[in-house]
Each structure stands twice: as C-alpha cells, then as structure tokens.
Amino acid sequence: MLRQAYHELSLATRGRGLYEFTAEVEAWIAREKFRTGLVTLHLKHTSASLLIQENADPDVRTDLENFFKRLVPDGDPLFIHTSEGADDMPAHVRTALTAVNLSLPLQQGRLALGTWQGIYLWEHRRAAHARRVALHFIGE
Amino acid sequence: MLRQAYHELSLATRGRGLYEFTAEVEAWIAREKFRTGLVTLHLKHTSASLLIQENADPDVRTDLENFFKRLVPDGDPLFIHTSEGADDMPAHVRTALTAVNLSLPLQQGRLALGTWQGIYLWEHRRAAHARRVALHFIGE
Amino acid sequence: MLRQAYHELSLATRGRGLYEFTAEVEAWIAREKFRTGLVTLHLKHTSASLLIQENADPDVRTDLENFFKRLVPDGDPLFIHTSEGADDMPAHVRTALTAVNLSLPLQQGRLALGTWQGIYLWEHRRAAHARRVALHFIGE
C-alpha cells in the first residue's frame, strides 16, 4: 500500500564548508519504517547547496571548498549585489553551480547510495546559519 | 488516495536571462487542487536550464548572468561545435553546469520553497525561444 | 493502480567521456510495461555524473569534455587529495559541478525528453570503470 510523508530537518552550520547529514535522513527513514520508495530532499535556501560526495577522505571536502573559493572569488568586483557582504553573491553563484534538490531511491529500508557516498549540506556563507531541508517520501 | 498528473508549460523567452515562472507552476497546482505530494519539473532543451534562486533583489540575476558570461565566454576558440553561432556551445556548457530538472515537495497545497526562492527558466541563447517544461505530480 | 519498481544498471566505461544510455533506460521501461509516472536515476559514484545533453552532433560532447578539462585541470597543485592520481580530485569537482541524479516524467510509455536530449553517463576518471545506476519508477 503506497503512502507518503513529509518532514523538515533543521541543520546548524558553523560557516562555510560541507556538513554530512546522511544519518539524520536515515534516522527519519528508520523511525517511519519506510522500506521501498523515493526520498526527495529540497534545501529551502539560495546560498547553500545539497551535495552527494565522498565521505571517506576529508581532504576531498577541503579541495572542493578551495576549488570553489578560487572559481568564485569573494569580493569579485564583477558583482553588484554586495549588500550582505563579499561572500553573499559568491554564495548564490556556488548554489547555481551545484544543486538544491536530490532524489534517492530507497530499497529494503536503505538509500541507494554508493559505498563512498554521503549526503552533505554545503554552506556557502562565512557566518553560521540554520538551514532547513524539506524531506518527502513516497513508497511503502 | 494517491493520483498523478502530467502537464506541459510553454514559456517564451526574449533571449539570455532568468525568467521566473513560479506562478505558472502554482496556477497548475491550484487548478488541479493538489494538496500533498511531489512536483517534478523537466526542461526539454539542452541550451537552457531550470534554476531555483533568489527572487528578491534583481541584481542577483544580473550577477549570475555576468558570472556565467565570463566563465563560459561566447566565441571561445576552444569550441568546435559552432554552426549555430558563438553562443551555441556556451549554452550547452551552461546547461551542464546547472540543471534541467527539479523536484519539489508539496505540502498543504504549497510548494516547499524557502521564503526567497523562486523557480526560474534560464535562457542561455541570445535569441528569443519557446521553451517547454514537463510537469509531473504524484500525491493527493 | 499505482505501483513502483527498482532496478540497477551496470555501465562499462572506457575512461573519460560521455556515454549515452537512453536506450538501456527505455528498454527497462518497455520490459516492465510502464506507461505513466516518474523515473528517477541515481548514480552510485562520486567521480562520474549523470547528464542530459544533446545527442545529435558528437562535437558537443567533445567541447563539453574540453571545457571541463580546462576548468578543472588534472594535476592542479591546489589539490591535496591526490592519492589516486592527477585525475582523482578533478573527477570529484566535475561531479560537484554537474549532477548524480535525474528525474524524468514518463507519459504514454515515453520519457518526457526533448527532441535532442539523451541521457549520458559522464565518466570523469581516465581509466575504464564499471558504474552502477539505480533506477526507480513510480506510476502505472
């Protein structure tokens, strides 16, 4: 019998960087006893992203952050939307270059993630923020 | 009782830039009386994108456009696929760097968008185009 | 009557480049006699991407590959995660800049793809790999 469910997570960041929250998503799935279906995540912000990336070597996250810092420099004189600071517009650009939603199949109670894949919130602002992720499930 | 629905939107662009169409998606949801579920959008083109971005300050869209113009220059001598003009291959690259589909939970008749989020069609070609977006709903 | 299904594809790559697999997805849809619904694809890797792009002129794939090669150079001294070679960290960055999942409406047994759209696996590593794609369907 197919059913659906909705939930929101609130994630606290300490400024720029990648924060894994695979465990929070899995806890919701376990609590609700979902077995088979589709899990969709949507981040309700325009200056942070959702990303699936390697959760083995933390150097990968350092390199990702450094690459994006160089590709979209803070304080770039190109930008006119600067009212919230030098990292404001770069955060929007970084969001456009990545994603704010993800869809993951669920099979026998497990997300169809690869061995090294984790689900990350990528905070693009320098200051700490509270970020909200909408979760939707449809399945059994 | 779960049900599903399919619809296509046709959006007219006046060349490069971001065009908000949140209202068109919401109008379909209201017309069909969808309450809770998952809304998926797919853009049927390879030289334009779907983007969720800030809909408050229009400078954000200007800066996004200018950043991408600099990152993927028109007429770049790197490109060999140039038959349709200097903006043809850059449009494909910009599409690869962004997204052509989006998935949004619907809760109590409202899309789970953040306060400042709007749904945009990003036209990457310089000329005006008619763009088609496939909409799918599953839920109640 | 709504139902769902899950399947995994294994795709063999011969190193860097774009590999179309629209036909493999369509073959699953035909075999299972799906008519109307939502097809979700998730790539279970962090150094390759899923991409919807033009399947007419092969020059588009050459240009995409060359653009990404220049944007994210192999062996960039910025990177510290280099244990698996000069193309290891660039592969993670290229994955972050593109996507690992896609959602496509299905209508009357046909994916809602545009005339020129094909579904590609984009291998970012130089060596040949076997890549797994999780497929989920919900609908009728």
Image (cartoon, coloured by chain):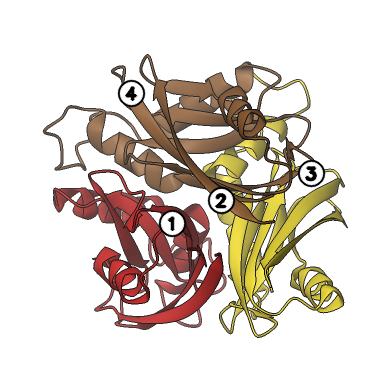
Chain colours: A yellow, B brown, C red
Q: Chain of mark 3?
A: A
SS at mark 2?
A: strand
Q: CA distance from mark 1 to mark 3?
A: 44 Å
CA–CA distance in space, label 3 to label 2: 42 Å
Dot 4, crowdedness within 10 Å: few (<14), some or many (≥20)?
few
Mark 2: few, some, or many residues within 10 Å (few <14, many ≥20)? Answer: many
Report which residue position mark 2 lands on. Answer: B4
Label at residue C98:
none
> Residue A82's spot in the image, x, y percent?
71, 22
Residue at the farthest left position: B83
Q: Mark 4 belongs to which subunit?
A: B
Q: According to the image, label 1 marks what residue? A: C36
Q: Decide: marks 1, 2 in contact (CB < 8 A)?
A: yes
Confirm whether residue C77 shows in the render.
Answer: no
Give the CA distance from mark 4 to mark 2. Answer: 26 Å
> As displayed, is residue C52 above or below residue B52?
below
Circles 1, 4 touching at the beta carbon (< 8 Å) = no
> Dot 1, crowdedness within 10 Å: few (<14), some or many (≥20)?
many
Say which of marks 4 and 3 sits in front.
4
What amino acid is labelled 2 in the image? Gln
| Residue matched to label 3 | A126
Q: CA distance from mark 1 to mark 4?
A: 25 Å
* Residue B124 sits in quarter: top left
